[in-house]
Image: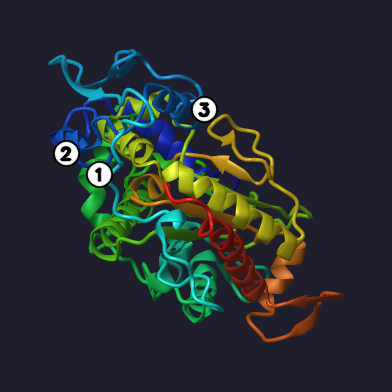
Amino acid sequence: MLLLRVPCRKITFHALAVVAVTQFALGASNISPLGKRPEWSSLKQYQETITHDEFARLLQNIYCPRGVDAELILIDSEGARLTIDREEKSYFNLRFARDEQSQKPAPRSWRPATALPTAPKNLDLAGIKVAIDPGHIGGRWAQMEERWFQVGDSKPVQEGDMTLRVAKLLVPKLRRLGAKVSLVRDKAEPVTPKRPADMTEVAKQILLRGGEATPREDFSGPTDPEKEHTIRWQDELLFYRNSEIRARAEIVNAQLRPDITLCLHFNAEAWDDPRSPRLTDHNHLHLLVNGSYSQAELEYDDVRFEMLQRLLSRAHQEELPLAESSAAAMARRTELPPYEYTTENVIKVGATGYVYGRNLIANRLFQCPVVYYEPYVMNSDEVFWRIQEGDYEGIRNVNGTDRPSIYREYADGVVHGLLDYYRAARNKPRR
């Protein structure tokens, strides 16, 4: 679920971080909260693996549509000068290939569909390594995450539990089609060993640089208008929104090394008080791929480095058509209209109208193509009642309409999107 429609947790934190943190995280210059100092020398493996025109096109159309400071990335006909340290005036010089015929293959841990052998009959996903990341945590952490609401005596709606349920339905479906499937988490518990109390020093620095010299320790509840200015709120945000996702990235990149990662989420619109939430008539669908970095985000050395890793590995070449295929299949299955962003932190990509480029920690740090699903508005009147029905086989009459389980509908849409993509892509010429 994207926080721009739920109590403004991510937006407020992002604003504090971007405005306030210049010489920040754990003593390192220009590193985002909890980020790691980049290993710029690792970009040597990408020398002469991309032409000037492709690098410029990806940078301008996908990753930096609002531009990038020439002091950070300066392109000429021969290569790109990538700034390592502004103060020290140190740079990494990336050399472009002269042309497509002379460019070297880009190294990567994942395999594009066109590099896979022909699939056996009835095993269209044979050999494909799929990581499934059920978004959020759920369980006893759901209220902290602000991924929880309850209408009267109804069952609480907890996104982290819902995404895990979809993930567990997906695993056997994909394995029966030949895929090698791993769950990034398999229970409603954090992956990170850290806890909110471990984040306090970083939280204090964020608040200090945001003008809060003597911040409150705690807030009075989810509707407290000043909660984002408290240490507890920042501690919790750093824990579940930052440390948790970074820990999942370690699992994906170091252990699983998949060909694709599927990030499962449910969407929502503002529900105000989670114990007396507002239901809406709106219901929609969209998917995300990595892209659309802001100027402020690019100021962070680690964020800029991670963006360049994705660009140079050509992750976009795989994840955009995969997301387009997935969006079309999800739209057919759910019959939902596309969501239309009203903010400037995204760029619409592809032809379906359902896919956007957006920079999120998960789709930036996972070093493979990532498709980030955002179907259904959890607090829409229609979806709320479907959630209350839980999971079931077949069709039920739900609030006056015959419906399959929302979890099975979601899982089936994911499966059909993967099948449509890989059936077509595995028959294309190899690149």
Q: Residues within 10 Å of mark 1 (few under 14, many from 20)?
A: some
The answer to which image quadrant residue 187 occupies is bottom left
Q: Position of residue 260 (x, y in %)?
A: 42, 58
Residue shown at 37% from the left, 70% from the top: 185
Q: Specify whether 279 is left or right of 64.
A: right
Q: Residue furthest right?
A: 400
Contact check, label 2 and label 1, Cβ < 8 Å = yes
Q: Residue furthest bottom?
A: 393
Residue 276 in sight here:
yes
The mark that comes first in sequence, 2 or 1, is 2
Q: CA distance from mark 2 to mark 3?
A: 33 Å
The mark that comes first in sequence, 1 or 3, is 1
Contact check, label 1 and label 3, Cβ < 8 Å = no
Q: Specify whether 401 is left or right of 182.
A: right
Q: Residues within 10 Å of mark 3 (few under 14, many from 20)?
A: some
Q: Specify whether 232 is left or right of 148.
A: left
* Vertical arrangement, residue 63 with respect to residue 323, above or below: above
* Vertical arrangement, residue 182 with respect to residue 352, above or below: below
Q: Nearer the viewer, residue 330 or 284?
A: 330
The answer to which image quadrant residue 239 occupies is bottom left
Q: Which residue is mark 1?
A: 34
Q: CA distance from mark 1 to mark 3?
A: 29 Å
Q: Position of residue 150 (x, y in %)?
A: 62, 68
Q: Which residue is mark 3?
A: 61
Q: Which residue is mark 2?
A: 26
Contact check, label 2 and label 3, Cβ < 8 Å = no
Residue shown at 64% from the left, 54% from the top: 327
- Tag 2's secondary structure? helix
Q: Nearer the viewer, mark 2 or mark 3?
A: 3
| Three-letter amino acid code at the position of disc 3 | Asn
| Three-letter amino acid code at the position of disc 1 | Leu
| Three-letter amino acid code at the position of disc 2 | Leu
